[in-house]
Amino acid sequence: MASHCQVCEKAPVAGVSYVHRGLAKAKGGVGVKVTGKTKRWFKPNLQKMKVVETNGHVHRVWVCTKCLRDGKITKAPKQSILREIRAEKGAAKKK
């Protein structure tokens, strides 16, 4: 799978996962202690989509769900609709 969004360049970010033990002071304990740290990756939620570029070409690209939700891309229409659009353009050129 691709590792970054091809629209906003969002990529995996390194982080740390902590393991705790003990009871919080607010709950009457002596405090929470860290007993382990492990490296981990925060990965973007990428989806493979058919996208229409500005010049009209359709490509498959990896897009994060935030870009999809914000409307930064134009999803390609279904094949049947594309055929109709191309047929209309061809008929318009012949006139």
Image (tube, rainbow, N blue to C red):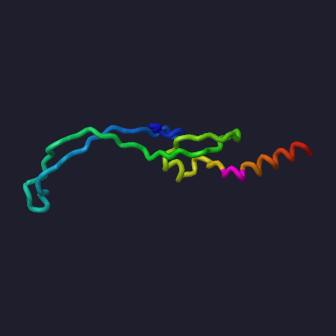
Q: Position of residue 72 (x, y in %)?
A: 57, 47
Left or right side of 74 for 33: left
Q: Residue at x 43, y 38 (%)?
A: 11
Q: Position of residue 28 (x, y in %)?
A: 9, 61
Residue 3 higher or lower than 70, as above or below: above
Q: Position of residue 53 (x, y in %)?
A: 65, 41
Q: Residue at x 52, y 48 (%)?
A: 67
Left or right side of 3 for 53: right
Q: Is 80 colored magenta in this rendering?
A: yes
**Quadrant position of residue 22:** bottom left
Q: How many marks?
A: 0
Say which quadrant the C terminus sits in.
top right
Q: Residue at x 49, y 40 (%)?
A: 5
Which one is nearer the viewer's eye here, 61 or 10? 61
Magenta span of residues:
77-81
Left or right side of 61 for 86: right
Q: Is 70 colored magenta in this rendering?
A: no
Q: Residue at x 49, y 49 (%)?
A: 65
Which residue, as the protein is rendered here, is positioned at the far bottom? 27
Magenta segment main secondary structure: helix
Q: Position of residue 62 (x, y in %)?
A: 52, 41
Which one is nearer the viewer's eye here, 85 or 69? 85
Which residue, as the protein is rendered here, is positioned at the far right? 95
Residue 82 higher or lower than 59, as above or below: below
